[in-house]
Amino acid sequence: MVVLAASIISKSGKALVSRQFVDMSRIRIEGYLAAFPKLVGIGKQHTYIETENVRYVYQPIESLYLLLVTNKQSNILEDLETLRLLSKLVPEYSYSLDEEGIGRTAFEILFAFDEVISLGHKENVTVAQVKQYGEMESHEEKLHKLVLQSKINETKDVMKRKASEIDKSKIEKNRGEKGGFMSLQSMSSRIESGFGSENSISSTGGGFGGGSGFGVSTEVESFASKPKGRAPASASAPSKGLGMQLGKTQRANQFLESLKAEGEVIVEDVRPTSIGQTKAAAPLPIDPVTLTVEEKLNVTLRRDGGIGNFDLQGTLSLQILNQEDGLIQVQIETGGNPGILFKTHPNINKELYSGENILGLKDPNRPFPAGQGDGVSLLKWRMQSADESLVPLSINCWPSVSGNETYVNLEYEASSMFVLKNVVISIPLPALREAPKVQQIDGEWRYDSRNSILEWSIVLIDNSNCSGSMEFVIPAVDTSDLFPISVSFTSTSTFSDLKVVTILPLKGGNPPKFSQRTLLSTETYQVV
């Protein structure tokens, strides 16, 4: 005694919604529904029809039929009660009882049918209960959302109070350290005029420039700049003129960090782990032809001296703005370093390159492709060595434990062959309650308490400061916890010393204007 199917059909027999409650084929139920309009008599008062196999219990709803298909052993009184309940539910979900309205709310009607009939038998439910089950309201979910919103509001209030405190502290320090700030401004201006805009040093910002100015956090995560041999006044108080700014981005970052502390999962597009890993976007090419020389260093130095790994990989890439400038050849010259092995692209004429140092395609009638993103690689090279004298920057670390404290002395020595920029030396530390006590430093420091990393940064290393040192004190620890020390830097000098001499047009006329970019950067540079 079961309901085989509950359906809403048109008076022509077209099925708009149909829910089967027993295992039956689609062809069979469609046959039952298509045969029903032919069996309905005109002017009859009853609302059921019996055939040889099934019973139809139905009710007209405007231009449609609400229909139950049951077996002949089903209790017709219970089926009529089920039909009346369904006839009350359909208008609750579909406000227009026509084919279009039923089609728009088909799934809601099916879900309601499922709440009323289970495995062909009527459930003891009312219209209000069915609507409640369909809405799936959860008191626990509402409570969770209210608690989460209250935490967010509380975090916003804390953020505003901290931002106000930092504003007041910044104003007081500006008043008290006016002289030191002006001297740092003049030094920053002098460096900028000497090395150009590539150093990203602002005469009003200082530090690493406005593009990578360091935000203020409630924890000790700020840079402090101290002259050599002078102890810092406070571990958490940075010097003025380091590009600290309070704005919407900084406050939003503080808000996100607070949400993370509450256990929320925050997805971010970009989050560099250290300042040295923050890479500025490459400038868009302006000249018709741009050639980029890029070298990446992978170096591993041993803490007790010597070199564990030295691997240099370089590429020369070509970027062309307009296709009409693609019929060219590139004349280059290298510094003659015997340790570097060069390899041309498979489409490059190797005989022309080996004989005349000219990079051109094997088919001279074929142009170089234009608009290829970062450009097309023409030449690659690699150098591996165990010669420690080739290392651009060596780091010496001398930790010593005395009583309940560990004294750490670091020293860097730079090669005179390179001018290094944006140097960051990152020293891992065990979890500390307070920032390390930096007693002497050449450059600037920053303590990232969240990742427990002390970062020593030098904007520029050249012949005037090819060596420098830093000394700090932390609670007694195992000295092996201070390794590996990571280093990052960039330079406009390269090991290959590759230069583009000229561009040779293949179609005659004047060669297109070209420019060359040169960059040496670190990929992995560690002291282990």
Image (cartoon, grey):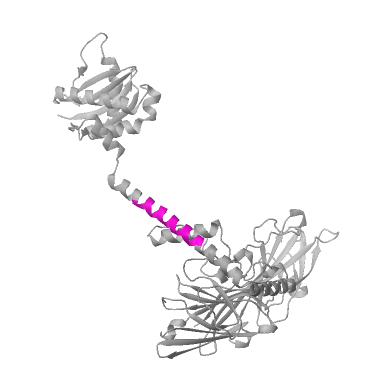
Residue 439 position in % (x across, y down): 53, 84
* Rendered residue at 69%/76% (across/down): 493
Q: Residue farthest to the top?
A: 43
Q: Nearer the viewer, residue 379 or 84?
A: 84
Q: Position of residue 508 (x, y in %)?
A: 85, 59
In the image, residue 155 lies in the stretch drawn in magenta: yes
Which corner quadrant holds the N terminus?
A: top left
In this view, 371 is above or below 52: below
Question: Can residue 53 be seen in the rendering of this structure?
Answer: no
Q: Residue 175: which quarter of the image?
A: bottom right
> In which quarter of the view is residue 313 placed?
bottom right
- Is residue 292 inside the magenta stretch? no
Where 120 sits versus 347, above or below? above
The percent coordinates of residue 358 (x first, y second) are 76, 70
Residue toward you, 211 or 524: 211
Q: Is residue 128 above or below residue 292?
A: above
The image quadrant that residue 98 belongs to is: top left
Magenta-tinted stretch? 147-164
Residue 481 in view: yes
Relative to 87, say whether 458 is above or below: below
Is residue 1 left or right of 445 when viewed as pictured? left
Q: Is residue 387 left or right of residue 123?
A: right
User: Is 528 in front, or is 2?
Assistant: 528
